[in-house]
Image (spheres, rainbow, N blue to C red):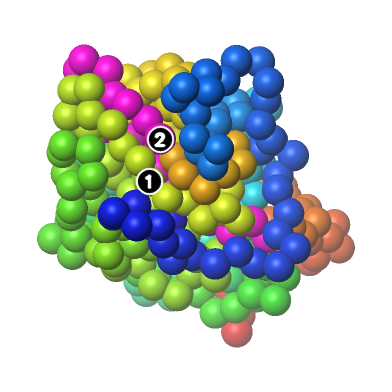
Amino acid sequence: MSVRVGRRSFLAAAPAGALWAAGCRSTTDAPIDPRKASAEARGIAQVVAAQQTKDGAGVALGRTIGSRALPLLDPFLMLDEIRSDSPGDYLKGFPDHPHRGFETVTIMIDGAMEHRDSVGNHGRLAPGSVQWMTAGRGIIHSEMPKQESGLLWGFQLWVNLPRRLKMTAPRYQDIQRPDVPETSLAGGPTRVLAGSAADIRGPVEGIVVRPTMLDVTFAPGARLELEVAPAHNGFVYLLSGSLDAGPEARRITPRELGVLGTGSTFVATAGGDGARALVVSAEPIGEPIARRGPFVMNTEDELQRAFDDYRAGRLTDG
Ligand code: CO
């Protein structure tokens, strides 16, 4: 994804033979107004309202990707939002649990979490921070609230790894708020967490699906026109305010995710209260997926081996 700044540029190249997720096709349920539509603007293929559920030791969260309405948006496997000022919704946290075969991305908006793992990594996730963890062949970690009251607000996004990297060594990128560069794309601050926008590069590096992850604040009525690599799958998730997104001006409100259809740009206009949204895209992987609980592999046999390795205490062995 790159930003249109007077000229067209596609910074992220398309992979050959990229496959689209089944859930990411343009729909024809909204008429396209040719006066507003440019030929390349991505429509909103689907709007998914967060499904309320619980995970970890009993944390209330809203799930969009990974819910029945949108099981997969390749390479994105899951998107959960934790957003509550009731400690009972989050205090139990996510005690020790394993992962293998993919990456977990934690985006903190408000409040704080503490992270520890089986090989001695330990860190605090503060407001405005992002942690990109490549679980690879195996990690056992805990993610616990570092507060007993007040608002806890954050996201966890699961991003798949291709077959050749599922058993790679675990890797962490812990990025604190001051290290996230900002620009302005829609009348308010845009934080560039990964990828690039307006020639500013985000701090997350070396991720195989070449993600772009932006936290965009819109002034009231502001319009965004953002280039998104045509080969990427992408989504927009509303944190506050409202957006009319795509050439059909589909309304998206908080706790809703819009799946971007095909095309090369994302266009959106904020409502009268402005808006804040995560805009995320990446290259799809297009491989078979076998997933259950905390493991995401290519085949049932590999999945069974992950459970066997975990039970035998060798999940994280190098
Ligand atoms: Co985890």
Residue drawn at the location 17% of the way across and 29% of the way down: 219
Q: How many numbered marks appear?
A: 2
Q: Are marks 1 and 2 in contact (CB under 8 Å)?
A: yes
Q: Is residue 181 visible?
A: yes
282 falls in the magenta region: yes
Type of amino acid under label 2: Val
* Residue 267: mark: 2
Label 1 environment density (alpha carbons within 10 Å; few <14, some 14–19, many ≥20): many
Which range of residues does the magenta coloring cover? 267-285
Across and down, in percent, residue 239 comes to 32, 29
Picture layout, residue 127 above or below residue 167: above
- Give the CA distance from mark 1 to mark 2: 6 Å
Q: Residue furthest bottom?
A: 318
Type of amino acid under label 1: Leu
Picture layout, residue 170 above or below residue 234: below
Residue drawn at the location 60% of the way across and 15% of the way down: 31
| Residue 136 placement, left or right of 147 | right
Q: Main secondary structure of the magenta part?
A: strand
Residue drawn at the location 38% of the way across and 46% of the way down: 226
Foreground: 204 or 94?
Answer: 204
Residue under label 1: 226
Of the 4 image quadrants, the one containing the C terminus is bottom right
Of the 4 image quadrants, the one containing the N terminus is bottom left
| Residue 217 placement, left or right of 160 | left
Residue drawn at the location 27% of the way across and 64% of the way down: 199
Q: Is residue 123 visible?
A: no
Specify which label sits upstream in the sequence, 1 or 2.
Answer: 1
Across and down, in percent, residue 67 comes to 62, 30
Label 2 environment density (alpha carbons within 10 Å; few <14, some 14–19, many ≥20): many
Asked which quadrant contains residue 159, the reply is bottom right
